[in-house]
Image (cartoon, grey):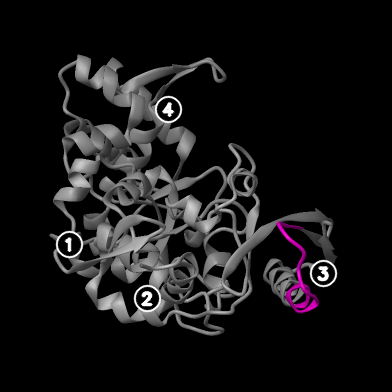
Amino acid sequence: MVDRQQVLSFRVRAQQLDRTAGALTDAAVLDIGVQNTGPDGARWALAVRGVDVTALSGAEVVLLWTVRGAPHLYRRADIGHVLAAVEPFSDADAGKRIYDASTPLKAAGIANLAALDEVAARMRAIVTTPTVKGAVSGRLASVLPEPYLRFCRPCDATHVYEMPFRLAAARAGLELQLDTSPPVLRRIAGLRKAVAPGDRFDLVRAYLRLLGPATPKQVADYLDAPLKDVKARWPDDVIEVTVAGEVRSLLAADEEALASADTRVTRLLGPFDLFLQAKDRATLVPDTAHAKELWPVLGRPGGVLVDGDLVGTWRPRKSGRTFTVAVQPWHPLSDAARTAVTAQAERLAAYRSVSLGGVDFAT
């Protein structure tokens, strides 16, 4: 039996949220990818794990559309293994990952993996120099046949389906240029893809290592992959533990770390921080109303982590070069907790290069 606090403490430690300083080279979350969505995206996620991101450049990291089609940051040195890791497990997996785009392909007798290869080949031919996403999409729409295309009502134009476009980019050896909006794609220089990801970058193992203990379904939900494919790749070197009556798996090497986990760290987590991406949301936030507040359909807030537990949400309120942090606690916070949260808000202000006007604690 493992209680909820042990699980959260294990993840805090595994994801290095409890360290005050650390290097990019050993930032564990980069093994699975750090989602770069919103102003407090990948860089802030690394900053709260002790990485100095003030001089972070494309020479050290690479941004790719990978898991769930979202942009994720990785170490550039790992790119060959990363590309092997994010490949669909099967044709059925590819079909699940590209959502509704698989329906017209199936009707036309085109396999999902073959379709991704076709889109990737066309993208590779188009992107010979850094090219904005819209231009790439427009060129693709002119060279790909109908099963690959959809009519977009808001644009009143025909486009390539979005998920095949995103998932084919890395397959084509294309990265996203950092800090560009709209996104700019460019070829990855000197790319050499690995034959296999290896244990460190294997996504099933990485999930268990950073977000365990977990079930195959939770991993499948995180990857948008079929449960069958995840079960087929389930590691042999796992132990079973019970969390809230549910049997889950943990890498055997992490058994002692789970048993001894005990953290008292306070952090302001970005809306798409890996800690909040775990698919056992009832473990993270047992209260249904609080869960709806933390994970709304649109406009996610960040999560307030105090003493290793999620205790509320936060949102930035910016005006010019000054901003405040609005905190919505789920229960009254002690003076010590408020002081710790305010210190993290100061850290966020420094990261954003703005002045902190204050922290607004809702009552």
Q: CA distance from mark 3 to mark 2?
A: 39 Å
Q: Which mark is residue 138?
A: 4
Residue 346, image quadrant = bottom right
Between 287 and 95, the one lying in front of the other is: 287
Please give the residue where the numbered disc 3 appears in the rendered image. Answer: 355
Label 2: element kind: helix
Label 4: element kind: helix
Q: CA distance from mark 1 to mark 2?
A: 18 Å
State whether residue 130 appears in this view.
no
Q: Amino acid at mark 3?
A: Ser
Q: Residues within 10 Å of mark 3 (few under 14, many from 20)?
A: some
Q: Which residue is pictured at 49% across the width and 80% down the height?
A: 262
Q: Amino acid at mark 4?
A: Gly
**Residue 62 position in % (x across, y down):** 40, 61
Q: Which mark is residue 258?
A: 2
Judge whether 88 appears above or below 209 on screen: above
Please give the residue where the numbered disc 1 appears in the rendered image. Answer: 235
Boundaries of the magenta span: 328-339
Q: CA distance from mark 2 to mark 4?
A: 50 Å
**Residue 336 position in % (x across, y down):** 76, 79
Label 1: element kind: loop
Q: Are marks 1 and 4 in contact (CB under 8 Å)?
A: no
175 vs 350, left or right, is left
Please identify the quadrant where the N terminus is shown.
bottom left
Q: Amino acid at mark 1?
A: Pro
169 vs 239, left or right, is right
Residue 337 lies in magenta, yes or no?
Answer: yes
**Residue 23 position in % (x across, y down):** 45, 82
125 vs 279, left or right, is left
Q: Mark 1 or 3 closer to N-term?
A: 1
